[in-house]
Image (cartoon, helix red, strand yellow):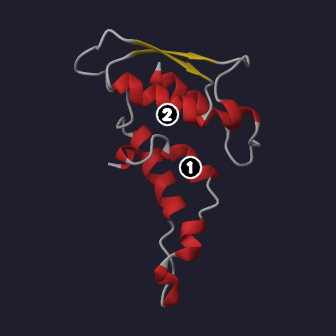
Amino acid sequence: NLHSTNNFPEFTGRICPAPCEEACTLNLEDIPVAIKTVEQAIADKAYETGHIRPYPPERKTGKRVAVIGSGPAGMAAAQQLGRAGHDVHVYERESRPGGLMRYGIPDFKIEKHYIDRRIEQMQ
């Protein structure tokens, strides 16, 4: 379950420079595991087949939490807090959510529809 260790594999699979691939011990005798490509492929296939979808919590805690900023950390916090049953509200100063991913990373690294798709899924 890729989501158990990475909230947004569709982002990291596109953005991460993958230094782990260079450090992979398989480099000694073979080619390294292409973890970046694997993450991206798994996430894309999971969206296509409906495996990435909202998972409402089994019970609500009745607690309300404000998350300031909708960049990767804010989105991950909101997702985890929501899964824990809290009522989460994300506040963003820009006109659209996404933070650094939307406003700091160029389109050739990550097309913004991937961000929009994830935000829609989280709402």
Provide residue 103's location: percent of width, then percent of height. 75, 33
Farthest residue, direction left: 58
Up-down relation of residue 47 to residue 58 (above or below)? below
Classify residue 45 as left or right of residue 20.
Answer: left
Image point 39% across, 22% down: which residue?
Answer: 82
Q: Nearer the viewer, residue 104 or 41?
A: 104
Label 2's element? Answer: helix
Provide residue 27's location: percent of width, then percent of height. 52, 83
Q: Which residue is mark 1?
A: 12
Q: Which residue is mark 2?
A: 76
The three-letter amino acid code for the residue at tag 1 is Thr
Label 1's element? Answer: helix
Image point 74% across, 47% down: which residue?
Answer: 108
Please report whichever mark, 2 or 1, sits nearer to the chain's N-terminal start. 1
Looking at the rendered image, the disc whose residue lies closer to the viewer, 2 or 1, is: 2
Q: Nearer the viewer, residue 55 or 66?
A: 66
Provide residue 47's location: percent of width, then percent of height. 43, 38
